[in-house]
Amino acid sequence: MSKFKKKKGGDTPAISTASLPDIVFMLLFFFMVVTVLRDTSIKVKQNLPYADQVEKLEKKNLVMYIYAGKPSKRYQGQFGDEAKIQLNDKFASVKDIQQFIYEERQSKREELRNLLITSLKVDKKTNMGLVSDIKQELREAEALKINYTSKEGDALQNIN
Amino acid sequence: MAKRNAPEVNAGSMADIAFLLLIFFLVTTTIETDSGITRKLPPINDEEQDPPPLKEKNIFIVLINSNGDLLVEDEQMEIKNLKTAAKEFLDNGGGQGDEACNYCRGAGDPKSSDNPIKAVISLQNDRLTDYGIYITVQNELVKAYTELRNREANRLYGRDFTAMVKDYKNKADYDGDVDKLKERIETIKDMFPQKLSEAEPSRSK
């Protein structure tokens, strides 16, 4: 009898937290691996439309990004609220697109140059006129592969 | 010589440091899934070419105005009905003789398309159309093609066309015959070729 009583009487041992750093490190490595650090800060509104017939852009280093949309709130005072194009880190006009494509092409290895895809990240409230102008410039620069980047979801939500 | 034990380094704060880093990465992480509708733009031809002759009935005209209303084959239409209309048009198979389509299941209306190989969808939009609406229409039209392709792939090979394309993309993990898979994908693509023509947008008055 007394044997059992003795055991019961002890304090509950503290849970060992020695393995906590290991768990945290595991999570840390996971996030370090999946993280893609943005190299550009986006200055235009990016409320992408929904679509469900999408293809994934596999090779990130072969994608050129063209952003378009209204300037975000803090740039509106300076640039107005007309939809604008953003290339790399700054606002650009339609005429700059060809130059941008050539520069991007130059920075890639020769055998990869014809695999480049242009990703159009355009806010859904943008007028098609601007998008058509972009497309026309891309045709002239012979960057014919494009991808209308969109969120995955039912496309009919775009209407509202 | 006095031998001193090296004092053990206290590793208790290791967790704090790791947490700090973890929170940093948690905040900066954007698990970006870049995906979208892939399209190919037509190249610019220096010399003016005469467009190949197309029969009026083989063209399916979709117009979008600046308010996002659709005019399909001279009739107003809701976007949610567009896919069905496009499918009916593509799958019509009204051709006779050389132009007959032996896999079509449509109504065979002589006023609609002869054969999916000849059928062209023409999309025209206004400069003031919202991009969101344009994407929705593109999406619905691509969906019409995908559903027809899936149907034929299921009939011929017993699986979805989309699944086949996915397998082809992950060639390394596919344990079947890759060449055969490619051939099958091409066959289905030839049955329902995506002929989506886009005119330059009209100016709004």
Image (cartoon, rainbow, N blue to C red):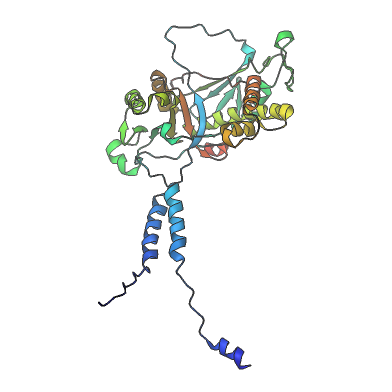
Between residues A102 and A24, which one lies in front from this camera angle? A24
Depicted A71 relative to depicted A101: above or below: below
Between residues A87 and B126, which one lies in front from this camera angle? A87
Q: Return the residue found at the far bottom.
A: A2
Q: Quadrant of residue A109?
A: top left
Q: Quadrant of residue B10?
A: bottom left
Between residues A47 and B22, which one lies in front from this camera angle? B22
Between residues B63 and A150, which one lies in front from this camera angle? A150
Give percent across and percent down for residue A125: 44, 35
Q: How many marks?
A: 0
Give percent across and percent down for residue A57: 49, 34
Give percent across and percent down for residue A121: 43, 34
Give percent across and percent down for residue A160: 52, 39
At a point 55% along the width and 39% down the height, the residue shown is A157
Q: Left or right: where does residue B150 sit relative to residue A68? A: right
Q: Is residue A129 visible?
A: no
Depicted A155 relative to depicted A34: above or below: above
User: Where's the N terminus of chain A, which quadrant?
Assistant: bottom right
Q: Is residue A135 visible?
A: yes
At a point 48% along the width and 18% down the height, the residue shown is B42
Q: Quadrant of residue A75?
A: top left
Q: Left or right: where does residue B8 sit relative to residue B48? A: left
At a point 70% along the width and 26% down the height, the residue shown is B152
